[in-house]
Image (cartoon, coloured by chain):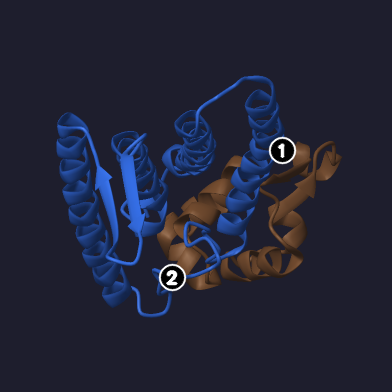
Chain colours: A blue, B brown
Amino acid sequence: MKNDFRLKYPLWMMAFIVLLAIIAYSLDSPVMEYVNNSNETSMEITIEPAKGIVLLVSLALYFTLLAIFLLQLKKYNRQNPTQKISAISIRPPEYLEQDEGMTYITRKAVQKVYTYITWALPILATIAIILPLSKLYIIYGILTVALGQYLIFYFEIRKHVKEETE
Amino acid sequence: MLKNRVKEMRARHSLTQSDLGKQVDVTRQTIAFIEKGEFSPSITLSLKLAKALQVDVNELFWLEGDEYNEK
């Protein structure tokens, strides 16, 4: 159970969120030049050298992580043909619903996440309205809320799975 | 609050949580949650557990304060 891919799924999502935050930083304020006249149509995006390196490294990391994630998912699906996880499922794959006990702890975790979201989103919206924040900080705020929801879910499930004894 | 003696009965039958879980078609974790009193099982699961442990369901589960089972 402790090695169940669904238990680790929130950790994967948190890693992707952190990488997205780094990508967002590297893409912040690029110089864009768009030319559309009778002679040419072109668009040029210029990124600072340092940010360009950060972008390349973070993109490479992102796709490497994505490849490992998909391989792990494939391995899990091969080992659990009756409980397959789809990479493009609308329903969150981290839900543990094999039986009523697992459904119970999933419900508890989801309730905590819902409570968190109920507070976090209005607070984030209020901060964004009041403070003159740049697009990057608003993106960071959204990613922080997303990271928080996975953290809450992961620790709540882990608490129950860790406590159980043979 | 629902009390139970699943752990005691399971030990009497020399069953592990996994063994009992397999018999009643739930995970080992769910048996552990029930034993700890963290989770109250459904009537269906309670009956399945009682059958697997060869006891009456009233002997396996009871409400806190029930004199017969508390003694």
The residue located at (76%, 38%) in the rendering is: B70
Dot label at residue A79: none
The residue located at (50%, 44%) in the rendering is: A157
Going by the image, does A37 lie left or right of B48? left
Coordinates of residue A101 in the picture (x, y in percent): 59, 56
Coordinates of residue B17 in the picture (x, y in percent): 45, 56
Q: Earlier in the sequence, mark 2 or mark 1?
A: 2
Residue topped by disc 1: A118
User: SS at mark 1?
Assistant: helix
Q: Can you tell which quarter of the image residue A122 is in? A: top right
The residue located at (41%, 57%) in the rendering is: A6
Residue B38 visible, this angle: no
Going by the image, does A137 lie left or right of A37? right
Amino acid under disc 2: Ile
Q: Can you tell which quarter of the image residue A74 is in? A: bottom left
Q: Quadrant of the N terminus of chain A?
A: bottom left
Coordinates of residue A105 in the picture (x, y in percent): 59, 49
Q: Nearer the viewer, residue B2 or A109?
A: A109
Amino acid under disc 1: Thr
Task: Name the subunit of mark 1.
Answer: A
Q: Is residue B21 above or below residue A158?
A: below
Going by the image, does A24 lie left or right of A107? left
Q: Is residue A35 above or below residue A114?
A: below
Sort mark 1 into few (<14), some (14-19) or many (20+) by Cα contacts within 10 Å. Answer: few
Sort mark 2 into few (<14), some (14-19) or many (20+) by Cα contacts within 10 Å. Answer: few
Task: Name the subunit of mark 2.
Answer: A
Residue topped by disc 2: A88
Q: Nearer the viewer, residue A149 or B40?
A: A149
Q: CA distance from mark 2 to mark 1?
A: 26 Å
User: SS at mark 2?
Assistant: loop
Going by the image, does A1 lie left or right of A101? left
